[in-house]
Amino acid sequence: MMRIPLMILAGFLLATPAWAQGADDNMRHPAIMSVMDEGTESQFVVGDAAWGDVLVTLATLQGSAPDRAPVIAEQLWQRRDTNPPIFLFEVARLTVESDPDRALHAYFLGRARTIYDASRCIDPTALAVVTASSQQAGPAVTALMNSDTARMEAALAAVIESGEVFTSQASPWWACSYGNAAYYAAINSAPMPGAEWLKVEAVWPALRTAISNNMNANLARVREGQQAESQ
């Protein structure tokens, strides 16, 4: 499945509406948009705030004037519970120099929420969205984590303690539409009922427990590494 290179396109989605749960609300109508870039055609899924829609908006934001960065970062942060969590990686990218603590907090919150969204997808190929989304934070965030483990530890601990990991109202469709199942449905003009892309809610608590346990284990490893370095 081909992915669109990040480019400046006409955007139309900034804040996704809050997700109301229900059988009818989980029906999705994926479609394909094709883009030519230097002779290469890329296809991606759009429709109902799908992965492609999110990329379009992200590309548009990244094409904004540099002096708008603080305003955009603050707006995205304020809308973190209604926007898909990929926009938290854009907050991290925009604030890594001006507010590194905010940048790392946004990064870890975005990553945890993305993992949760992808984990609720029936299609296991959708899990690749975690890496694709995290990369949007940019190399400066990675460099910060590698150079300042104390700040990284504090940010990860703050995200865990905040209780915000599972409070997002955004539909996980943005992540599930990254997978192959949504792509094949789109090229066949086939709608996707919730039962075809979203795991039943009965399994969500177990997913939350697994993600929480993983975050706590990661925090413990970071602290063990800090302790070893100080000896």
Image: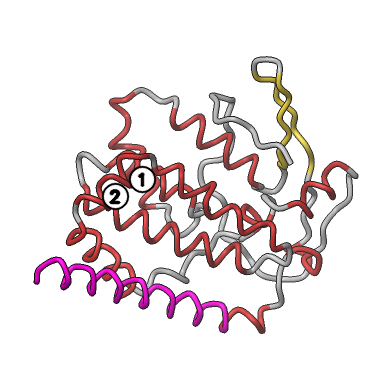
Work out whether 91 lies above or below 43.
below
Which part of the image, by quadrant, shows the N terminus?
top right
Could you tell me which residue is drawn at 67 percent across and 50 percent down?
A: 178
Q: Tell me where residue 210 appears, x and y as whole percent.
A: 51, 79
With respect to residue 230, does 220 lie above or below? Answer: below
Residues shaded magenta: 206-231
What element does badge 1 sit on?
A: helix
The residue carrying mark 1 is 91
**Viewer-side residue, 214 vs 12:** 214
Q: Residue at x 31, y 45 (%)?
A: 141
Residue on which disc 2 sits: 103
**Residue 48: where, in percent of width, then height?**
70, 48
Residue 163's place in the image compared with 82, above or below, is below
| Tag 2: amino acid | Ala
- Residue 229 horizontal side relative to residue 176, left or right: left
Instruction: Return the x and y of residue 47 as percentages of the image width and height.
Output: 72, 44
